[in-house]
Amino acid sequence: MKPLQGIRVLDFTHVQSGPTCTQLLAWFGADVIKVERPGTGDATRTQLVDVPDADSLYFTMLNHNKRSICLNTKHETGKEVLARLVSSCDVLVENFAPGALGRMGFGWERIQQINPRMIMASVKGFGPGKFEDCKVYENVAQCAGGSASTTGFLGDVPMVTGAQIGDSGTGLHLALGITVALLHRQKTGRGQRVLAPMQDGVLNLCRVKLRDQQRLRAGPLREYSQFGNGIEFGEATPRAGNDSGGGQPGRILRCKGWETDPNAYTYFITQVAVWPRICELIGKPEWIDDPDYATLKARLPRLDEVFAEIEEWTSTKTKFEVMEICNPLNIPVGPILSMKEIAEDQGLRESGTIVEVEHPERGKYLTVGCPIKFSDHNVVVDRSPLLGEHTVEILADVLGYEDDELQRIIESGAVGKV
Ligand code: COA
């Protein structure tokens, strides 16, 4: 018995944010039916193509464990089929541009009329307000959610991050919203609308930066390197480079081989609790009792000097040796892992974090498995569906169309070629 077994999801999502959400629901056991435009489908199927005539990795890595039905929802017969899908599903997830579902004739009021138990969940760029009608992609959300202004180095331009916090991050938020709405429906019998705006999702992940914005009123942010460098703070939370977010100063430091390997670095945290061990490790035992270094408060204006000494030590070791030496001493460090190293890591494959999947068009490829592990539910990652692979199966088995009706729908052209 899978946790969401028996829950059927009408998946109207495309690109990344929505598909991240519905992929999770599928991994939790829901029957996810992806509705795609005949002929083209989700635009990502043909974006960033690496194997000719095969679904791209962009698509396959975001659409595992789903079924695909082709349906032109602007065609009269397509609308009839869509209405039947709405009445047969528990959750509708969409991330169209604002207003698109209404233009299709399936706004929230109509959905409620057809199926009052329906949970209608949306990703949009912005919540209600002056930007609610805007189309939004990942980096726009990172900028509007406060991430870009606080990422990067002081004196340099705002920076977006490699982690897709706007798209995948918001998909995660929406999946949580949907599971809560399902629990609520169990108690009340009613469906509801669930909205996850990307700006809100990014800001939620940047919460500590809004914390710092307010702390500025009380004076400089002493744990930022900028403080030790004597650079005045402005009116807004500044970019903090690679400083640790909290009160345990950390930096990215060179390791053996940094001259030729762009990822020969470690993240090193000078956690207060293990400061004496750090001093001994790097050959500065005199710092343990020296009043200029013994306390965090005394060290904060000297972080450049402290980290320069630690880096003298880390540059004599590989990033993995640093980890092997520091871990038993309880000193928190982390190697900067490249995607190549992650892809080749056997341990990550054994834990299901990286999964190898077989696909009929492209052969074997790697993907990221379910990032949440359950003691009572084993997530099996199945390949993504081909475009319209399950059209007939869904029309017949899920929607109950008999042979003659099935023929009429296929001949109408609303479901494309089958
Ligand atoms: N049959 C017929 N028409 C379909 C269809 C189907 N199965 N599926 C989609 N369409 C139509 C829509 O109804 C819409 O038509 P309309 O503009 O005439 O109303 C059209 O396809 C395009 O949809 P849209 O969502 O506007 O796509 P886009 O490519 O122009 O914009 C985004 C893409 C991502 C910018 C936009 O969808 C968006 O802002 N989404 C919300 C935020 C978001 O999730 N962004 C991150 C994506 S990773």
Image (spheres, helix red, strand yellow):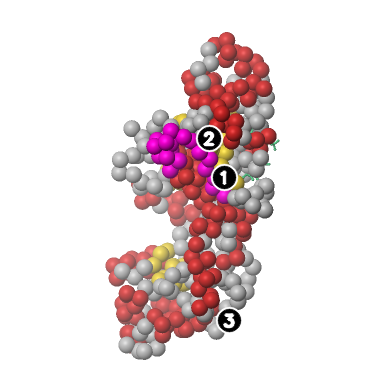
Q: Residue at x 59, y 23 (%)?
A: 81
Measured in 3D between alpha carbons, the distance from the residue under mark 3 to the one under mark 2, in whole angstroms, is 50 Å
Image location of residue 335, percent across then percent down: 42, 64
Amino acid at dot 1: Val
Picture layout, residue 318 above or below residue 303: above
Q: How many marks?
A: 3
Mark 3 residue element: loop
Q: Is residue 38 left or right of residue 165?
A: right
Contact? badges 2 and 1 (CB < 8 Å): no
Q: Which mark is residue 232?
A: 3
Q: Is residue 223 left or right of residue 122?
A: left
Residue 5 forms part of the magenta stretch: no
Measured in 3D between alpha carbons, the distance from the residue under mark 3 to the one under mark 1, in whole angstroms, is 39 Å
Amino acid at dot 2: Leu
Q: Give 284 or 152, whichever is nearer the viewer.
A: 152
Mark 1 residue element: strand
Measured in 3D between alpha carbons, the distance from the residue under mark 2 to the one under mark 1, in whole angstroms, is 11 Å
Image location of residue 25, percent across then percent down: 45, 39
Foreground: disc 3 or disc 2: 2
Amino acid at dot 3: Glu
**Reading the chain from its start, which is encountered first: label 3 or label 1?**
1
Q: Is residue 315 left or right of residue 73?
A: left
Q: Quadrant of residue 356?
A: top left
Identify the residue under disc 1.
123
Q: Which residues are magenta?
A: 179-197
10 Å neighbourhood of mark 1: few (<14), some, or many (≥20)? Answer: many
Q: Give 240 or 265, whichever is nearer the viewer.
A: 240
Q: Which mark is residue 92?
A: 2
Say whether residue 184 is visible: yes
Q: Residue at x 62, y 59 (%)?
A: 143
10 Å neighbourhood of mark 3: few (<14), some, or many (≥20)? Answer: few
Asked if the residue at label 1 sits under 8 Å from ligand 1, the reply is yes
